[in-house]
Image (spheres, helix red, strand yellow):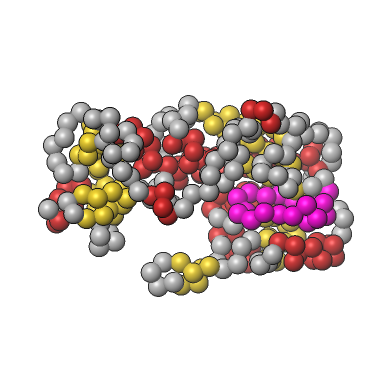
């Protein structure tokens, strides 16, 4: 390509990663290998599925590495030579310092928050849960610490208060990738240097698990519940008991009236009206369809 011929090793796993990888390939970067998690079992049938980036890499004749331990790739990196940069987007594994140091100028990470806010594994969910008005993406130099590396650049993204986890991941992946591509030639040529974060302003978000899916009307307000539905869409989901059944809420809104069993009163006395859900059958249905079939 015209701006740099640097070879890149890409670290990523999911759809967020895939957007970045596709764009790097699209503008002509030489991707020597894609490093991703091992294939995993998914769904009721426990079918073995490959990560999204692996499917794309194989279709584009890019070598794929799926180490059980990230350090297992060190010798492969050394064979490529010292003139290799790393790019990481939503990889999902800790990379040891020894591996990071094999790259020049290092591994460049796309983190979907305005660091030092929301360091950790769930910044997108956290910004929705907390009702923030802005978020963004930070292009940073990876370190062995928890998202504490110095920052090359950031882009701010305004929030409407209606976006879901899916919407926001896509928007931030797009914005972050374009910012990365703009900065990457200067980062690789080391004509710009990253600026250290202010650790005193740092905040952290936690790793989410299935146990976080419970939506308890006695524990949260209706507004908090509405934000959780949007933040936890797909994973870890938002589960609630209605009409003697446990369902997964996929769409809901705040309401002034309690007119049906799916208009749920929360601890602040306000109402969350469930619009769409996944029924015990596993099918996604409307509130009216659920009432007709299960009441």
Q: Nearer the viewer, residue 84 or 120?
A: 120
> Going by the picture, which residue comes out furthest to the front?
218
Q: Nearer the viewer, residue 63 or 293?
A: 293
- Viewer can see residue 185: yes
- Viewer can see residue 30: no
Left or right of 242? Residue 45 is right
Vertically, is 13 above or below 232?
A: below
At 81% from the left and 34% from the top, the residue drawn is: 193
Q: Nearer the viewer, residue 33 or 261?
A: 261
x and y, in percent, of residue 175 in the image:
58, 38
x and y, in percent, of residue 109 in the image:
68, 45
Residue 102 magenta-highlighted: yes
x and y, in percent, of residue 269 in the image:
23, 30
At 61% from the left and 62% from the top, the residue drawn is: 37
Vertically, is 153 above or below 72?
A: above
Q: How many marks?
A: 0
At 41% from the left and 46% from the top, the residue drawn is: 232
x and y, in percent, of residue 11 in the image:
67, 55
> Going by the picture, which residue comes out furthest to the right?
82
Left or right of 268? Residue 118 is right
Residue span colored magenta: 86-104
Residue 108 magenta-highlighted: no
At 60% from the left and 54% from the top, the residue drawn is: 92
Residue 155 image-quadrant placement:
top right
């Amino acid at each position: 390509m015209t701006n740099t011929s640097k070879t890149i090793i890409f670290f990523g796993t999911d759809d967020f990663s895939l957007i970045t990888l596709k764009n790097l390939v699209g503008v002509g970067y030489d991707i020597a290998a894609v490093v991703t998690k091992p294939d995993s079992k998914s769904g009721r049938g426990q079918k073995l599925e490959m990560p999204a980036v692996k499917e794309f890499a194989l279709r584009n004749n890019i070598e794929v590495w799926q180490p059980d331990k990230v350090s297992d790739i060190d010798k492969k990196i050394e064979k490529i030579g010292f003139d290799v940069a790393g790019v990481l987007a939503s990889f999902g594994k800790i990379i040891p310092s020894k591996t990071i140091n094999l790259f020049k100028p290092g591994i460049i990470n796309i983190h979907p928050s305005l660091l030092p806010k929301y360091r950790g594994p769930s910044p997108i969910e956290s910004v929705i849960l907390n009702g923030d008005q802005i978020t963004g993406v930070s292009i940073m130099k990876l370190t062995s610490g928890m998202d504490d590396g110095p920052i090359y650049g950031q882009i701010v993204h305004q929030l409407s208060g209606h976006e879901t986890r899916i919407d926001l991941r896509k928007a931030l992946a797009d914005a972050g990738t374009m910012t990365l591509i703009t900065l990457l030639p200067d980062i690789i040529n080391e004509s710009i240097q990253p600026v250290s974060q202010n650790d005193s302003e740092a905040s952290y978000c936690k790793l989410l698990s299935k146990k976080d899916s419970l939506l308890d009307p006695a524990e949260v307000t209706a507004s908090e519940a509405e934000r959780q539905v949007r933040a936890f869409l797909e994973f870890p989901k938002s589960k609630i008991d209605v009409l003697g059944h446990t369902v997964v809420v996929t769409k809901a809104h705040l309401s002034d009236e309690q007119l049906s069993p799916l208009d749920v009163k929360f601890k602040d006395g306000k109402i969350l009206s469930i619009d769409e859900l996944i029924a015990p059958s596993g099918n996604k249905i409307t509130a009216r369809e659920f009432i007709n079939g299960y009441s």
